Amino acid sequence: MQYIHNYINGELVPAISGIYIDNVEPATGMVFSQIARSGAADVQKAYEAGKSAFESWKNLGAEKRSHILLKIAELIEQNADALAHAESQDNGKPVWLAKKMDIWRASQNIRFYATASLHASNHTYQNPDNINYTLREPLGVVACISPWNLPLYLFTWKIAPALASGNCVIAKPSELTPLTAYLFSEICIKAGLPAGVLNILHGYGYEVGEAMVSHPKIKAVSFTGGTKTGAHIAGIAAPMFKKLSLELGGKNPTIIFASADYEKALETTVRASFLNQGEICLCGSRIFVEESIYERFRNDLVEKIKKLKVGDPQDDTNFMGALVSEGHMQKVLSYIELAQQEGGTILTGGKRLQPEGRCQNGYFVEPTLIEGLSYDCRTNQEEIFGPVATITPFKTEEEVLSYANSVEYGLACSLWTNDLSQAHRIAGKIESGIVWVNCWLLRDLRTPFGGMKSSGVGREGGFEALQFFTEEKNVCIQF
Ligand code: NAD
């Protein structure tokens, strides 16, 4: 049995409570490791470590910090196989996907911010008898809290800009997927990251996570997770005037016009709906297809979905693995039930899957496509976050815009058209933080990333994240 310990002041230590939480492998339903159950006392210990390390980390300068971060990225790359297996075991996603997407991106996140911080610059405003310039200072000890769907990927996406800009960090991965964060702490030790600069705490969100958010000296909270949790965290952090970055839920539209490149739209829609078991905040779960091609597209989509292989995440021929937990699987199945009560027809999928052999008790759900629902029913309005998509025809641009924008979320949209003016028109009117035209999940790390409406507040990515983790000061000098 593996023990997942906290990383505080450069050491791997049990939680002060001495208590552990069972960690379940979603593909088998079996407990395979034990997670330290941390609380407020562990947060205080991590805070003190961060506070002691802060001045020297800040004063080390961007270039020396960059060297250490690049060493961490290199070690992630050297250990990519082991990390991918660990991510798959913890989350249920296929090993091939963990390697290609999660672990690769984790090292890219670190490389990106290790080098971006070298190019960050401040402003000057020149006048005949005076000059203003700005300084940017790291905040101090900051909190980073991440979810289970892209564990190491999102964990590093927050930690990298925080560290690169000179902050000390207390970070918490999801209690459902703590393993790669633990392995990451071992990598940080090997890479020579000074003690206390990064502290990683494990345990429940409502215990250790909430203690991080409400700690009076922690200056900023960068959070990715559910919209409800985000609202709760904002309720605690906002009156304490902490800087807050919230990346929350989504219910993203995929909009396909008749002029689109048919085959590319079809292939990509399958990926956009079901990659990572549909457990990506950017997945398209509402597919809208122009009426003139609706029937053909729907039938072809059903055929493609039926061919998707689901099963043991260790088998590289499987496109989908297990959902992250039994509770999440039950939630997804309950939405499939609800969709039928709301008048939907299941075109394919709709059931739990129990593959023979080692994965018989795993949390697998068939990729599911549902037709015949109104755009405003609960199935089409609430985030399901699993392998479930709905398909709906539309006649006009105005109609599909009103469907797409009808939800409380505004994270991402994938738009398919070969009419350039239409692409610009719709991109301008869609309420979402990102609009992909004739593509999906094409990411450039320099771009701002985040959501509108209930999908979040603030932007990550590029220089935006370096700005979030620093405070700007204006200096005005009269000659
Ligand atoms: P969640 O909100 O349940 O948990 C996210 C993290 O917050 C976990 O580490 C959890 O332990 C912690 N947490 C829970 N309660 C807390 C509290 N009271 N105080 C502090 N921390 C607390 O979300 P989840 O189920 O892990 O993740 C799925 C959600 O994340 C989905 O809604 C998905 O859309 C969203 N998500 C958004 C993005 C994005 O970039 N917008 C990316 C990935 C996932």
Image: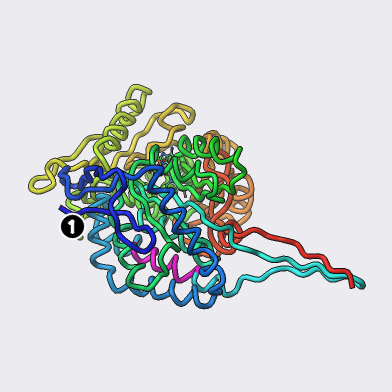
**Magenta span contains residue 193:** no
The quadrant holding residue 154 is bottom left
- Residue 301 is at least partly visible in this image: no
Most extreme residue toward the right, as rendered?
Answer: 129
- Residue 90 is at least partly visible in this image: yes
**Percent x, y of residue 451:** 54, 46
Q: Horizontal placement of 388 versus 250: left or right? A: left
Q: Horizontal placement of 118 versus 20: left or right? A: right
Say if 392 sits above or below 440 in the image. Answer: above
The quadrant holding residue 378 is top left
Q: Residue at x 53, y 77 (%)?
A: 63
Q: Tell me which segment is drawn in magenta.
A: 103-113
**Percent x, y of residue 253:** 48, 43
**Percent x, y of residue 399:** 56, 35
Q: Quadrant of ligand 1?
A: top left
**Percent x, y of residue 444:** 50, 64
| Element on which disc 1 rests | loop
Badge 1: residue crowd in 10 Å (few <14, some 14–19, many ≥20): some
Towards the viewer: 201 or 235: 201
**Residue type highlighted by circle 1:** Gln
